[in-house]
Image: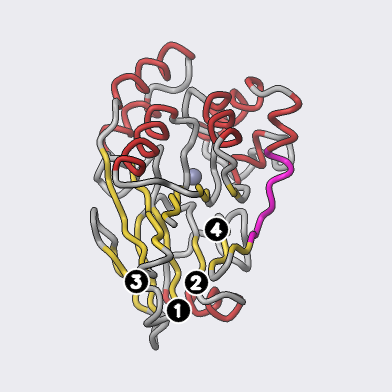
Amino acid sequence: MRTLIISDVHSNIEALTTVIADAEAGGAVGAIWCTGDLVGYGPDPVAVIALLRESKTIAVAGNHDLVACGQMGVEEFNPVAAEAALWTRDQLTPDEQAYLAGLPLVHTEGAFTLVHGSLRHPDWEYLLTPEQALDQFALQTTPHSIVGHSHLSFYVNESQPPLFLRARDRDTVALETTRLILNPGSSGQPRDGDPRASYMLYDDAAATVTWHRVAYDIAATQRKILATGLPAWLGERLEKGK
Ligand code: ZN
């Protein structure tokens, strides 16, 4: 079975629909997993939540999801993120907020643990250093973990010290040679200089994960951001991939 793994969709329905279509173009997708930040920043929180619920996506909560359902304040957010987060909260019905509030911070699925930030600080830590990776491996009860939050696509081998490797389009890693920390990158707001939506495919028969990048209609998302009155920078950054 092929599983589509996404993260940091950030209310970007154009990116999400393009990612799903691109993944399905290569063969049937049996499940979707998402490591948080379904909403925040982008103009379509309602449509993104609806599509992910309809697709029976297995998701964990990100910090933006927690703000959008009122479980976290915006004190730690920069002003632009805070404005978008509070706008997002206003768009959602009590039912949509309850859906986000019901997402776990950590979820185990077979050989994988899903968490937005890190296992020691699920809703805020950016896992970016070998020291953090060592702690993550120590807390992992499964062979592999999948994180998001940094909007960067990479994987970390459990070597001494742990080795961070950037994952580019079509990069594939075998799952059975080492324990791994995996980041699919951001579908809705990549920050590695490549504006194309990022995602990962897990093939359980081959025991591999492969990263993919796909171009989507950024201009359409930018127009909606301006039309809703969200900060213009949130549209500009999409074409820069930062
Ligand atoms: Zn995010």
Nearer to me, 153 or 123: 153
What amino acid does circle 2 point to?
Answer: His
- SS class, disc 4: loop
- As measured in the structure, the alpha-carbon distance from the residue carrying label 4 to the one carrying label 2 is 14 Å
- As measured in the structure, the alpha-carbon distance from the residue carrying label 3 to the one carrying label 4 is 16 Å
Q: Magenta region: which residues?
A: 100-107
What amino acid does circle 1 point to?
Answer: Arg
Q: Is residue 207 left or right of residue 37?
A: left
Among numbered discs 1 and 2, the one appearing first in the sequence: 2
Using the image, tell me which numbered label, if any, was put on residue 144.
Answer: 2
Determine whether label 2 and label 3 are within 8 Å by CB: no
From the image, tell me which residue sits under label 3: 164
Among numbered discs 4 and 2, the one appearing first in the sequence: 4
Nearer to me, 199 or 154: 199
On screen, 153 above or below 96? below
Query: Image point 63% across, 68% down: which residue?
Result: 120
Using the image, tell me which numbered label, if any, was put on residue 179.
Answer: 1
Q: Position of residue 95 (x, y in %)?
A: 74, 28
What amino acid does circle 4 point to?
Answer: Gly
Q: Position of residue 165 (x, y in %)?
A: 30, 69
- As measured in the structure, the alpha-carbon distance from the residue carrying label 2 to the one carrying label 3 is 14 Å
What amino acid does circle 3 point to?
Answer: Phe
- As measured in the structure, the alpha-carbon distance from the residue carrying label 4 to the one carrying label 1 is 18 Å
Query: Image point 31% across, 28% down: which residue?
Result: 236
Q: Can residue 105 be found in the magenta stretch?
A: yes
Among numbered discs 4 and 1, the one appearing first in the sequence: 4
- SS class, disc 3: strand
From the image, tell me which residue sits under label 4: 117
Q: Residue furthest bottom?
A: 160
Residue 116 location, quadrant: bottom right
Determine whether label 1 and label 2 are within 8 Å by CB: yes
